Amino acid sequence: MTFAADQVGLGLATRAGEATKDDWDLRVFGHVPGLLRFGPISQGWLKETAKCWVAERIDTVETPRVTQAVLRAVRAFSESLCRHRPDRGSDPRLVSRSDLVAFTNDLAHLEARGKLARNTRRQWVLEVDRFLREARAMGHSRPGGPMCGLPEDVVFRPGDHVRSVPLEEQGRALPQTVLDQLLGPAALKVLEASCGAQVRAMVELEARVGRRTGELCGLRLECLAFDEVLDDTGLAGAAPVLIHDMPKVGVRAYRLPIDEEAVEIIRAQQERVRARYPASPPSQLALFPAVKQNPYGAKPCRAVTLGGQVRAWVDGLAQLLGPGGEPFDRSDVTTYSFRHCYAQRHADNGTPVEVLAALMGHTRLTTTQGYYSVTQKRKRRAVDLLATLQVDHRGDRTRAVVERLLDSEHLRDGVGQVAVPFGICREPTNIKAQVNLPRFGCHSLKRGSMLSREGGGRGTTAQVVLGGVPGEGGGVRGRAEEVDRGRVSRVGHR
């Protein structure tokens, strides 16, 4: 009976009628079930501005989660106005920039007490700043608008924004030994016993697909699909893809290639959800539905809930050892760590950075590069590849046994030198300027060239600079040897 009444009420609801309420049903606007809560906003002008702002944004490519995040920040700003203003912020004409400063101070105080994460504090400042700027651009501060009278200096300045946590300090890629322990049967059994099979499936899937935590939680039940691809023999086959939204970058229905193990995890979770909500249409179900206050299975679980469950699981493990057998710092393990591990795994396997950026959903390559580090193994491979091509003035390899070099020697080979014809140059000024291209030779020699003929004619010998030391006036005094010109010519054409 309750379900029938709900469906009848939904059929009779209109956008105009919903806009008069303090809590909007997202289904009326064509979105998944959920509420946009304006009631906790105490100031009438701020509440009306928020409603007007949402009314213009709700039909954009952004998902409701983005709008709900902005409203949470606006509600926090409303509470700050109530605390610090004698009139509780009811008159927009009396609001000043000092109220924004008080709001940022409140957030800093909550962070210091451990009640607010640094990233949440930073995000709320950004969201309120975005809200005020866009509301002004929409004309809500003009005469007759809900923000009419709000002073123009009520804006955030660059110094008000909170610096983000460096990537190397936030959810960096975990060592492979630590990742193997977390995804081992023993640890996953502990996770399933304490949090259930759904949370275990979320952790395993996140480790394989590397999605943002909000994207993982927002997956729909029918997120699995297959693309037709041609194999090496020209025969058509089915390749699995994960369909999901990327609200952070405004992408909908992104198709991420996945492997068969991820497919098995998704299918097992689909069976659990269908058994839990047999009467709900599959198109309305979430792949990872919230446990509480979710009678129809359409409401997805929250990212903060998953983060707390992962935190409790990791802290409750009997032991977690680092690469050297030492106790590993468990605070370094977060749900976002698996996304960094996904990027690091692709980078180590040689995935081009532009392809990895597309898989990660990044619009800038520099963002993708911050998700992984260049490992010592990749540095060794790059140096070994180049070292086999380096020769001296006799045409012999400069290093007979490159494979025996120490790691420190490999690292030194990658810096402090630039390539020149028939060798390398270590003159500091040239290295800094990066001008010693093989085409031009060593520019530190002011009175000669890398290869000069003796006597100005067609002789049979040439002078090749083997090394140099700084001389007077910024020049270099080079040491030369007589070599057979024909042999040098042959070396240059190898």
Image (spheres, rainbow, N blue to C red):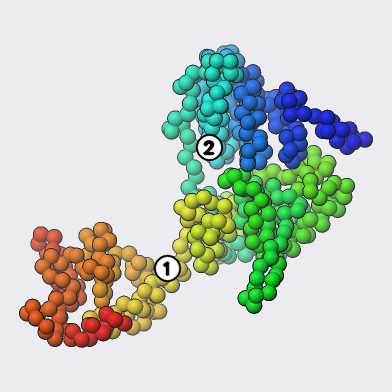
Residue where numbered disc 2 is placed = 122
Query: Looking at the picture, how far across and down is residue 11, in whole percent?
Result: 83, 33
In the rendered structure, find residue 297 and report the number of the disc placed on it: none
Residue 448, x across and y down, in percent: 12, 70
Q: How crowded is mark 2: few (under 14 residues within 10 Å), some or many (20 or more)?
A: some
Q: From the viewer's perspective, is residue 158 above or below residue 420?
A: above
Q: Is residue 175 left or right of residue 17?
A: left
* Mark 2 → mark 1, Cα distance in angstroms: 36 Å
> Does the rendering let one see residue 340?
no
Query: As drawn, is 355 to the left or to the right of 196?
Result: left
Considering every residue shown, the one lying at the far right of the view is 1
Determine whether, in the image, residue 257 is placed left or right of residue 389. right
Q: Can residue 362 be seen in this view?
A: yes
Q: Which residue is drawn at 61% across and 48% down?
A: 251
Give the vertical position of 86 relative to 339 (above or below): above
**Going from the N terminus, do you reach mark 2 or mark 1 first?**
2
Q: Position of residue 392 (x, y in %)?
A: 25, 80
Residue type at numbered disc 1: Lys
Q: Which of 430 and 176 is in front in this view?
A: 430
Quadrant position of the C terminus in the picture: bottom left
Mark 1: few, some, or many residues within 10 Å (few <14, many ≥20)?
some
Mark 1 lies on a secondary structure that is helix
Residue at image mark 1:
379
Q: What residue type is labelled 2?
A: Arg
Residue drawn at 61 percent across, 28 percent down:
53
